Amino acid sequence: MRKLLLFGLAALLMAGCSSEGDLPEPKPVTPVTPEQPEAQTDTVKPDEPEPETPVRVVPAKYTVARMDITVDGGMAITSKDKADYRGCTIRIEADTATWNYEGRGRIRGRGNSTWEWYPKKPYRLKLDEKAEILGLAADKDWVLLANYRDPTHLMNTLVFKMGERLGIPYPNHTRYVELTVNGDYKGLYQLTEQVEQGKNRVNIDKEEGLLLALDVDDGPENSPGAADNFWSETYGLPVCLKFPSSGEEGQGVEAKDAAREELATLERTIEHHDYNALAEIMDIPVMIDYLLIQEFIYNVEVAAPRSIFLHRDKGGKWTYGPLWDFDAGFDFDWGQMTTGHYFFKDYRETVLGTDPARHVSDYTYTSSFFTDMWKNKQFVSEVKARWKEIKPRIMAEIWPEVMRYAEAAEEAMARDASRWPIDRQPKTEINRMEKWLNSRAVYMDNIVSGYPAGR
């Protein structure tokens, strides 16, 4: 899954220089020692108090809370199967007293590769009663992301914030917690909402809403025995019907067949790249934002695809989102996928492509479902215009807010690194991430401006 032959030849022509080496280094700064004023013994009275240093108040949402989970009987969490939920007591202590929480629920593992490959495990929580957790809207279902592969702990946070600021519906939020399970310190976790239908989740109609995941793991290829998945008709996408569940009483295969048929209509419209027809059934501005974000962070999961969500409310248009799962972006080294934490080496790669309609990309097999609209002139024009609006906001507006989480979690990151020692340090990797993002934004200018105009 790495380089195309064409891309490899281009790399040789560049004399083997890595993009990281090409990044401009900061100019040296020569320290200047200010002239010292003459001593003045009569201007400050000996008993005059020193001015107080102002205390910096960190807004609650950026701070790291303490979460303690005690599983009934001290049982270990060894499975991600629904049948293996374990009863537990959950206690949360936050810097904001009103966010403190204690209640009953159940816990199990979650994830695919993150559960199977890595020693630091992610978890799924289901509370017995709906509750607001750390200031987030009340619900029963929550996720604890381990972010073991991500040495910055910020990759999901950055993309969640991008989605929120750009207006992609139903964005996930970030709260950081230091987790202890049965007295065992597990490290720094990212608490966020479960992606599902619900009033405070993906708020689509209970009777006629649809929530789909385009996901090779949950789809028929890797989960052939599941009752809630199917192959799409035009592009052969692996689809999992997240809502309504085809396993629920009264739904059965009818819900899955109806979803397949409706998705097929969307696929045929994209295949014909008719802008006006697509605008009738798809929220095109959100589609453009969603796909630009995927390309900007070089999220190769689009090529599989994995973790790509689409939803449609009753009587509404198909809409991309929520955004989910981004520790495979940022130039992750797939040669180290089971053990590594290697990111940010090269910013000059594409997943949708420099010419998406013709699959000129490092991932030529990315489904045309994501790229056929680049055959349309109006669509390409709107992509180019929207990128000009997005680009200056990334590092001037969104990244500084992400850094507020990083600064508040600095000590917790150090404790996590001690609990799960890897060959990377958070502060160093966050600096590399910032450098990569700045370079990637400039490179994206070249990519987007160079898109063929379509017809």
Image (spheres, helix red, strand yellow):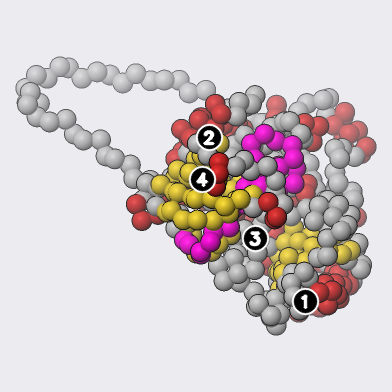
Residue at left 67%, top 36%? 149
Instruction: Say which residue label 3 marks.
Output: 195
Q: Position of residue 404 (x, y in %)?
A: 47, 44
Q: What amino acid type should be assigned to the residue bearing mark 1?
A: Gln
Would you place residue 156 above or below residue 272 in this image? above
Q: Earlier in the sequence, mark 1 or mark 3?
A: 3
- Sequence-wise first label, 3 or 2: 2
Nearest the camera: 96 or 90? Answer: 90
How dense is the environment of label 1, judged by Cα within 10 Å: few (below 14), some, or many (20 and up)?
A: few
- Label 4, residues with CA under 10 Å away: few <14, some 14-19, many ≥20: many
Element class at badge 1: loop
- The answer to whether the residues at label 1 and label 3 have Cβ atoms under 8 Å apart is no
The CA span between labels 3 and 2 is 28 Å
Q: Three-letter amino acid code at disc 2? A: Asp
Q: Which residue is mark 4?
A: 69
The residue that appears at 48% across and 62% down in the rendered structure is 131
The image shows residue 369, relative to residue 304, as above or below, that is below
Q: Amino acid type of disc 3? A: Val
Between 376 and 415, the residue placed more toward the observer is 415
Q: CA distance from mark 2 to mark 1?
A: 42 Å
> Which residue has dot 1 on it?
251
